[in-house]
Image (tube, rainbow, N blue to C red):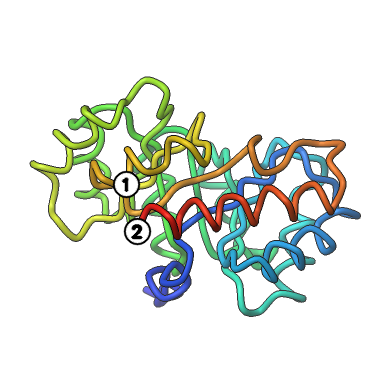
Amino acid sequence: MKTAPDFRDALSTLPLVAILRGIEPSQALPIGHVLREAGWRVLEIPLNSPQPLQSIAALRARLPQCLIGAGTVMNAQQVRDVHAAGGQIIVSPHFDPMVVAQAKQLGMLALPGVATPSEAFAALRAQADGLKVFPAEMISPVVLKAWRAVLPPDILIFPVGGIKPDNMGAYRQAGASGFGIGSALFKPGMSVSDVQLHANHFYQAWTASS
């Protein structure tokens, strides 16, 4: 089994994952550079974006300081495709043991989506590197705090869905390790300067909640 990249090291300064759903390959590098300059080190290209593997390959080649991965990964073949494009992280909206197993076999990080404690423990038994709590709109900070009380204390937990600068603090106090940030950071049609502004707002919100 290959060794996965150091996820915790990449998250040490800013544990936020940029979810760039809908990004075009022509936008990937300009936006990737802006995010890197704003302190972001983990970038996710959902596979339901236009030509996602091209964006992943471009970012991987030009941003060696960042971890580049794919989201909305639904099966083991997609894991292999992402790996061939240079991707390092596999993120899913659900937990599929075959997806996690294929990612680990290829030395990639696996972040499956979970919405119940049963799914969370099953994902950890499958050797997931962290948990994507999704959708976070359904899982309040109170619920997350209860999860944190029973899950292993060193497990990385990332609420995803509806996360904004003004609700990060409550989730963080409840035990969130970081967050996945989607449409509040990037939506198709946004300019590079818009993304830069949102990226800086999230950076400041994370710093203020520490």
Residue at screen point 74% across, 66% down: 59
Q: Nearer the viewer, mark 1 or mark 2?
A: 2
- Count of marks, rendered view: 2
Residue at screen point 46% across, 37% down: 160
Using a 10 Å C-alpha cutoff, classify the residue at mark 2 as few (fewer than 14 neighbours), some (14 to 19) or many (20 or more).
few
Query: Which numbered tag is attached to residue 160?
Result: none
Residue at screen point 46% across, 54% down: 206
Q: Position of residue 24 (x, y in %)?
A: 85, 46
* Nearest to the observer: residue 135 or residue 113: 135
Query: Which numbered tag is attached to residue 210?
Result: 2
- Residue labelled with disc 1: 172
SS at mark 1 in the image: helix
Q: CA distance from mark 1 to mark 2?
A: 8 Å
Q: Position of residue 147 (x, y in %)?
A: 17, 36
Image quadrant holding the N terminus, namely bottom left
Q: Is residue 15 left or right of residue 56?
A: left
Residue at screen point 35% across, 59% down: 210
Identified by mark 1, the residue type is: Arg
